Structure formats: C-alpha cells, structure tokens
Image (spheres, rainbow, N blue to C red):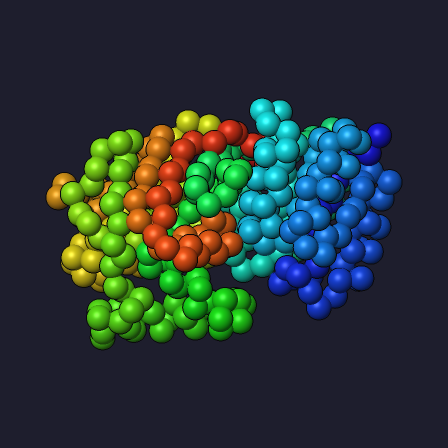
Amino acid sequence: MKPIGVIFNPFAQTNRKRVPDQLNAIKETLGSNALVRATSSVGEVPTVLKEFHKGGIKILCISGGDGTISYAVSSYLNLFGGEELPVIVPLRGGTMNMLSADVGLSGDQITICRKLVQSLEKDKFRTTERGLIRVIDPRFKHHNYGFCWLDGFPYKFIKRYYKEGATVGAALKLIFKTGIISLMNMNHDLFKEVESRVYVEDRELPFKSHLLLVASTVKRLVFGFRIFFEDAQAGEKFSIVYVTLPYFKKVRYQIPRALYRGLKPDESGNFLNQSTESLRVEGNRGYIIDGEIYEPEEPVDIRLGAGPKVKIFSPKSIN
C-alpha cells in the first residue's frame, strides 16, 4: 500500500513551463511511497481521488495553486461524504498559494517533498489543523469548500491580477497602482461598492452595499497579510472582515498597519472584524474561493458555513 497520493496540475504557474522535469523530480523524491497523477482538466480530479481512496491513500499532496487545493478538497468531500480527509500537503504552485505559507511550509515543491519523506522516515510526521468554509451556491449540485472566500474589492483586484499575468511582479505592480488610486481617485471602479444584503449568523447588517467582504480560516493571506482581529476555530468558526466605503475612506492611511495587525471592529457597523459560524450574502455578483473565480450571470444568494476540519502537513507544527 502506498501512503502518499499526488495530484499534479500541469497548468499551475510553477508547473506549466517544466511539466516533465517537475513531475519526474516529484516521483524521484517521493519514490515508491507515492502514486503520482497529472490531471489535464478539473474533470479528472474525481477519478484520481477515487483511485487514491480505493488504494488507501492517507496523505494527499497537491501540486498547484490554492484553487487546485480547493477543488481537490471539495471533490473529496462530495465523493466520500463524512469520511475524514487525508492529510493535505500543499505543494506551492502559484502566487496565491496561501495555505503553504500559513502552516509554515517554506521552499519549493521538491523541498517540501523531501521534508515529507524525512518526516515519515524519522517518525516525526507533524500536522496542524485548519477548518474549511462550506460555500452553498444554488447554481451547483454540490457544495464547494475552501479556506478563503472573497467578494467586492478583492474579487475585482484578483480578476485584474489574472489579466495582468498572475505573477509576483504583476501582483506587486497592481498593489502599488491600487495604493495610488486609493489616494487620488476613490471614484475608480475598484472602489465602487457592491450592492447586496449581508447577514452574520442571521443578523442583517444595516447597509445595502459594501466595499469588501473576506471570510477565511487561514490566519495569513497572500504576502503574509494578517488582517483578522479574531482567529477562526477549526470546524466551528471562520474569520470575517466587512468594510463599507465610508469607513475605508476614513482609515485608508492606516492600511499598511491594518494588513499586518488587524483593526478592531467599528461600533457603527461600518467595519466588522470577528469570527462567525455562518454568513449569508443576498445578491452576490461574483466571488473568489482560494484564487478561483466564480462569476454568476445574475445576482445569486450565497451561504457560507463552518466546514469540517482538515489536517495539514506542518513540520514545525504551526498553530
């Protein structure tokens, strides 16, 4: 029995220019311990997972960005119901790969594979827990699961980021441009509020539009941003940040501090920074799950809830 299964996305940013070399290096590093499968489309992921499930795979390595991880986890839960997920080993695959950084997995894919083999050989295999967010969208027959859900400003930002090349350089350039725009032109489309009704644990928020809404079970977002005032509780609650445009205009000069320390909630309700068991957005016009874009043709009502816990390989056992 092979304990490790690897899903390899050849279209991920890190893989696309050197698919054969990267695949061979992963196979060579993991050796006889692993089943390695490359997928040419997301439609092949369920077939691979069924093979891994039948083979008793307990450790699932995913070579791809956060979108690949989210799709693999969602497929597993939708296929096998309440069964415990395998331990996830995120092999870094793109700029938006937040999960690896959040659990302290540094280095490239091969370095992480070496750490995994060494941990198993020395019987020092350590994990940390993160919760998932269950996303219920009436357009889909099955639920989607992920570690981070975004709408409003972040949704617009990431769409632009993909159009500009989806590289570290493109991200840094866009962050710089966005900072300048926030100081010079708050009427720019990036900062236009989105109209929707938002409910936190069935409590309706008083505003009919907002600038941004972030829900997450990871503590650190892209580039190490730590914006949350209350940490998520794996399997029970996820963190949220809700911001209206008037509040953003008021505190935009504090953004650098807010990105790495988190701001306290605002008493007026213009700014929430807390943890919650559930969230509902009526009239959503587009959102992101872990880097993957979901763009409805018409406004749609989305419900978010605390999903199951998942164990992530973490050599340093970061909490």
Q: Point out residue 87 in the picture as x, y percentages from the top left corner.
A: 64, 33
- Residue beneath the point at 65% across and 51% down: 42
Q: In this rendering, would 13 be left or right of 132?
A: right
- Residue beneath the point at 64% across and 29% down: 80
Depicted 70 relative to depicted 172: above or below: above
Residue 316 visible in the current orientation: no
Look at the image and tell me in which quarter the N terminus lies: top right
Residue nearer the viewer, 54 or 63? 54
- Residue beneath the point at 44% across and 64% down: 159
Number of numbered markers: 0
Q: Point out residue 83 in the picture as x, y percentages from the top left corner.
A: 62, 25
- What is the quadrant of residue 104 in the picture? top right
Depicted 52 relative to depicted 209: above or below: above
Residue nearer the viewer, 105 or 214? 214
Q: In this rendering, would 75 be left or right of 178?
A: right
Residue 67 visible in the current orientation: yes
Q: Point out residue 169 in the picture as x, y percentages from the top left corner.
A: 51, 71
- What is the quadrant of residue 46 in the picture? top right
- Residue beneath the point at 39% across and 63% down: 157
Depicted 238 relative to depicted 178: above or below: above
Q: In this rendering, would 137 be left or right of 122?
A: left
Q: Point out residue 222 in the picture as x, y percentages from the top left corner.
A: 46, 55
